[in-house]
Image (cartoon, helix red, strand yellow):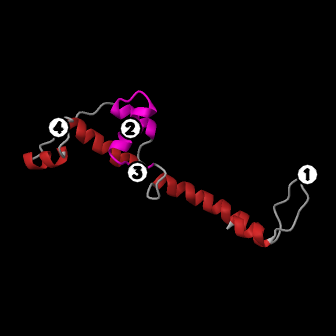
Amino acid sequence: MEITLTANIPDDTAAHLQDGSATPLPRRLLELAVIKAYESGLITEREAMNILGFEDEEQLSEFFKRYDVRDHMSATNPRRQRALGAIGRRQEAILSKVESGFWPEEPDVPEAPITSSVKEFLL
C-alpha cells in the first residue's frame, strides 16, 4: 500500500521543522515519522529501511547516528520492555530454584547445591 499525504503547514512551522536541513520538507517529515515510529517500537529496522528507500543496514545506521536515534533496545522501547518482561519471568523462575538451593534437574547432570557466590552472580 502506498499513501500520499497532503498537509498545510504554516511557513514558520515548516521552517522550524526544516531545522536548517537542506533535505526537502516532505522527505524531512517522512524521516521524522520513521524515527518516531522506530523509537516507539511500531516499526522494525527492516521496515524503516524500506520506507526510507535504503538498500543496506549501513545506510540506516548512518541515518540513525546522524539523527541521534535511540537504539531499538533502549530502555524506553516497548519491544525491549516486552522482551525484558519475558526475561524477567524466566529469571524469576530460575531464581526461585537457586534460592531453594538446587538447579533444575538435568538428565545427565547430578543435582548440586548452589553456593552463595553463584547466587550473587545470578542476582
Task: Report the amino acid beneath label 2.
Answer: Glu
Q: Which residue is mark 3?
A: 70
Q: Which residue is mark 2?
A: 62
Image check: 87 left or right of 80? Answer: right
**Is residue 79 positioned above or below 65 on the image?**
below
- C-alpha span from label 4 to label 1: 66 Å
Q: Nearer the viewer, mark 3 or mark 4?
A: 3
Residue 34 in view in this figure: yes
Q: Quadrant of residue 90?
A: bottom right
Residue 5 in view in this figure: no
Q: Earlier in the sequence, mark 3 or mark 4?
A: 4
Task: Report the amino acid beneath label 3.
Answer: Arg
The magenta segment: 45-71
In the rendered image, residue 20, in percent from the top left (x then y), is placed at 17, 43
Instruction: Name the magenta segment's main secondary structure.
Output: helix
Task: Report the amino acid beneath label 1.
Answer: Asp
Which numbered disc covers residue 6?
4
**Which residue lies most toward the left here?**
11
Q: Earlier in the sequence, mark 4 or mark 2?
A: 4
